[in-house]
Image (cartoon, rainbow, N blue to C red):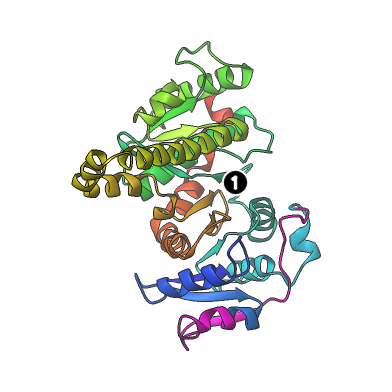
Amino acid sequence: MRVIVDAMGGDNAPAEIVKGALAAHGKKNVEIVLVGREEAIRSAAAEQGGVPDSVRVVNAAEVIEICDDPATAFKQKKDSSITVGLTMLKNGEGDAFVSAGSTGALLSAATLMVKRVRGIRRAALCPVIPTAAGQAVLIDCGANAECTVEYLVQFAYLGSFYAKRMLQVKSPRVGLLNIGAEPSKGDDLRRETYQALTAAAEGGELNFVGNIEAKEALKGGCDVIVADGFSGNIMLKTIEGAASFLGGEMKKMFLQSTKTKVAGLLMKDALRQFKELLNPDRIGGTAFLGISRPVIKAHGSSGAAAIENAVYQAAAVAESGIIADIEANIDSMRLSSHREG
């Protein structure tokens, strides 16, 4: 399994990217290709003992910056690490691609270079979030993207395929993120999507459990949370903020006095497990579902541990059969399949 890694993407590139990628090399049957400014890559790798002979380094002189236009940057910077890496993926020189660079630039480049699966209208992001029942997929089209009923119906299928293949959920419960559970809740987009997903459920194609509020989703009310990009992004950032706030308050609480410090020591293992549950580095990256080859977006602030896990995530997606599932079910995923009459 060969994973191509954008060594220049992200806040901590190239040092942490190279460190994480090299940590994954040779484990879980993974081979690494590092793409970026070769001198910078080899300099970063020197702290890890250098680049192993079995790791390929591909020079790319340009870097797509966060200030670049995401829609056109990959065209203007044809020798960027993203453009070169995705070209390699398209040409079969690797099985998956990982980048912590600009989300917009990566999605635009993947869509136009690697291409979407035929019949998919828009690729979707699918971060995995912790819930009381374990994990759930939060699937949306990105915060700045216009959303339609057709997109949300396709996202429901994409999230369901992901939950089956990656989270090992036999019959994923699909919920539509909304302000209430009743079918009449929400705007026209939510109400029309509810009807379409209900029709898909009645046809035995999805396990749609109806509208779901954010609080119920976090309690484990569903395995796939379908959202427009704006609502989904707010929910994701709220979860991240709440986790950070809760962790900080608990730390202060256990440091208040000798008694609480002793209690903290007694609960050390349980607290470590709780902290790990909320640690985004465990997953490492988010797949762009709907692209014809595996493309994984790691968080922009990713450190070495997150990149290492993003590489494993990329390999797992490549081996999972998700893309084949999508290709085989395109007809069912079309909105026209779920309209009455």
Find the magenta span and give its range: 42-69
| Rendered residue at 57%/83% (across/down) | 42
**Residue 316 appearing in the image:** yes
Q: Mark 1 belongs to which amino acid?
A: Ala
Q: Would you say residue 320 sits in the magenta stretch?
A: no
Residue 96, compared with residue 229, is above or below; it is below
Q: Which residue is mark 1?
A: 123
Q: Nearer the viewer, residue 254 or 136?
A: 254
Q: Main secondary structure of the magenta part?
A: loop
Residue 340, compared with residue 91, is above or below; it is above
Where is the C terminus found, in terms of image quarters? top right
Q: Nearer the viewer, residue 4 or 192?
A: 4
**Residue 203 appearing in the image:** no
Can you give x and y, in whole percent of width and height, for residue 155 in the image? 53, 37
Q: Quick one: which residue is furthest to the right in this view?
A: 76
Horizontally, is 275 left or right of 177 in the view? left
Residue 213, compared with residue 267, is above or below; it is above
Quarter-wise, where is residue 261 in the image?
top left
| Rendered residue at 42%/75% (across/down) | 25
Q: Would you say residue 61 sits in the magenta stretch?
A: yes
Residue 247, compared with residue 110, is above or below; it is above
